[in-house]
Image: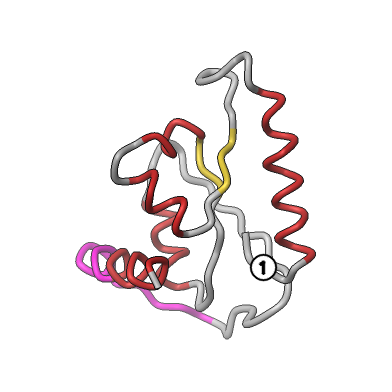
Amino acid sequence: MLSWLITKLVGQAVAVFYDLERIGAGVASGPVLVTANHPNALVDPLVIFHTGGRKVRPLAKAPLFGHFIVGPALKALGGLPVYRKEDYPDQMHMNARTFDAVIDALRSGEAV
């Protein structure tokens, strides 16, 4: 329920600034790995949430999960933390757990 609300709110916010048009039917079910080039911006993931047509579990840099607004939203969306060397040089090993979760999600037919 919370992920649906977040997706709808994000969609409305994105629509204020961008005229989006989805071309093609997308992938309604089965495993999907979405990749987007977004150099230090949140717009691309927001557009994907709005136009994806299904729940997409985001990967995000680990510090965002500690943010008082973004963290709970990422958790509600099923987000997975990525530990970057520049943020947590001693926790890079935690990425193995994250990518195991990505593989499990894809095997379960989810979109990541």
**Left or right: where does residue 106 sit relative to residue 48?**
right
Q: Position of residue 16 (x, y in %)?
A: 20, 67
Q: Residue at x 70, y 52 (%)?
A: 102
- Viewer-proximal residue, 93 or 61? 93
State yes or no: residue 17 in magenta: yes
Q: How was this image coloured?
A: secondary structure
- Quadrant of the drawing holding the C terminus: bottom right
Q: Is residue 11 left or right of residue 110?
A: left
Image location of residue 15, percent across then percent down: 26, 70
Write the residue at 58% across / 85% down: 25
Dot 1: element: loop
**Residue 18 pos. (x, y %):** 28, 65
Quadrant containing the N terminus is bottom left
Count residues near mark 1 (Cα–Cα under 10 Å), then give few for <14, some for 14-19, many for 20+: some
- The residue furthest bottom is 25
Q: Residue at x 56, y 83 (%)?
A: 24
Residue in the foreground of this view, choosing between 2 and 56: 2
Residue type, label 1: Glu
The residue sitting at the top extreme is: 90
Give the residue pinned by disc 1. 110
Residue 66, quarter of the rendered image: top left
* Residue stretch in magenta: 12-23
